[in-house]
């Protein structure tokens, strides 16, 4: 059994690039808890709040419930559920899962494989992250689900994922003249840009191409905020800031809220700007809530 490949092929509801990372998030969480207790069960009532937070922070913008993956992950052969009614999930209802004291854990075969081959846990986690989230979120997701991996365990797998174009970073940075498209940061050490990254607008994990019209040159801060849905790109390529973002200090205002309504800096003439379909995907699948009014006339 190739458990890493099975993790990459979790059955998810999908239509037109819609994000549905419910099952991957539950499986990542279960792997993290397995490190703590290889035989322990996860009572739904005990982990419901943890799963809610994960879905709220890393799931799609639309409302969702942890009961969905707790029930449906059983069908992928990596997760089992039992309740007062016996083996098997009692259903997808939150009240039902609570009332029947439903509890889940990794299936016995997977637990045996993880004990026999400890590096398997890291490979499965990497596959789940690569298939569902941008690299800027991987480190904090490890922490959020409680995974502690050795560097060797986090080695990327190439057999179960398409290859990225390594030229994209340089092409995007060149297109935006090596400065952040949101704030203009253009720091260097000597001749080497530092703190600048090529962000995918439509995430690579969701068929976002390695093309300049799907990229933005962003500083590390704004790349993270863009991938977390705090920032977006609207019509006429103006910056959007989520109304859900809260920051009272001067730095938060200068670096985030005062960006609302500003035009992007770049790309340089002759280079394709971010394509409308990619902007639309990010606004529906990543951007959180409604945009703030423009901070000032631009």
Image (tube, rainbow, N blue to C red):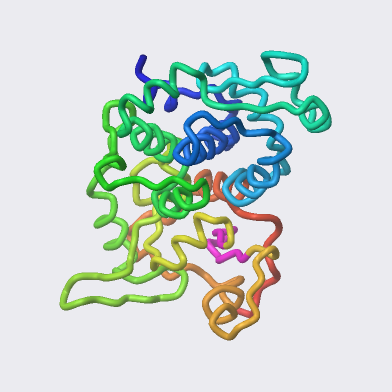
* Residue 58 image offset from top left, x and y in percent: 57, 48
Residue in view at x 60 percent, y 71 percent = 261
* Residue 184 image offset from top left, x and y in percent: 40, 76
Front residue of 292/65: it is 65
- Quadrant of image for the C terminus: bottom right
Image height check: is 81 above or below 186? above
Residue in view at x 69 percent, y 63 percent = 244
Residue in view at x 39 percent, y 66 percent = 220
Query: Which quadrant of the structure image shows residue 257?
Result: bottom right
Front residue of 229/43: it is 43
Q: Is residue 112 magenta?
A: no
* Residue 146 image offset from top left, x and y in percent: 49, 48
* Residue 62 image offset from top left, x and y in percent: 70, 44
Image height check: is 156 above or below 237? above
Please report the bounds of the magenta region as a residue range. Answer: 231-241
Left or right, residue 79 beside residue 163: right
Front residue of 87/212: it is 87
Q: How many marks?
A: 0
- Quadrant of image for the N terminus: top left
Left or right, residue 136 beside residue 250: left
Residue in view at x 79 percent, y 25 percent = 100
Q: Is residue 235 magenta?
A: yes
């Amino acid at each position: 059994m190739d458990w890493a490949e099975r993790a990459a092929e979790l059955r998810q509801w999908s239509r037109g690039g819609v994000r549905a990372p419910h099952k991957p998030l539950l499986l990542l969480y279960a792997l993290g808890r397995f490190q703590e207790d290889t035989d322990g069960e996860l009572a739904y009532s005990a982990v419901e709040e943890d799963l809610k937070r994960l879905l709220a922070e890393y799931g799609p913008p639309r409302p969702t419930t942890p009961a969905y993956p707790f029930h449906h992950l059983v069908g992928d052969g990596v997760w089992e559920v039992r309740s007062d009614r016996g083996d098997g999930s009692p259903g997808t209802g939150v009240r039902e899962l609570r009332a029947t004291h439903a509890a889940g854990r990794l299936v016995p075969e997977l637990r045996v494989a993880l004990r026999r081959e400890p590096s398997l846990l890291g490979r499965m986690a990497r596959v789940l992250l690569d298939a569902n989230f941008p690299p800027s979120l991987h480190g904090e997701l490890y922490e959020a689900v409680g995974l502690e991996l050795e560097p060797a365990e986090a080695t990327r797998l190439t057999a179960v994922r398409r290859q990225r174009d390594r030229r994209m970073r340089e092409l995007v940075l060149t297109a935006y003249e090596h400065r952040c498209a949101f704030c203009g940061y253009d720091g260097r050490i000597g001749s080497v840009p530092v703190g600048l990254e090529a962000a995918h607008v439509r995430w690579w994990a969701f068929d976002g191409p390695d093309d300049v019209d799907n990229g933005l040159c962003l500083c590390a801060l704004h790349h993270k905020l863009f991938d977390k849905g705090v920032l977006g790109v609207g019509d006429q390529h103006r910056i959007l800031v989520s109304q859900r973002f809260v920051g009272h200090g001067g730095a938060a205002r200068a670096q985030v809220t005062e960006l609302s309504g500003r035009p992007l800096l770049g790309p340089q003439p002759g280079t394709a700007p971010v394509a409308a379909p990619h902007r639309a995907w990010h606004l529906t699948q990543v951007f959180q809530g409604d945009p703030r009014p423009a901070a000032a006339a631009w």
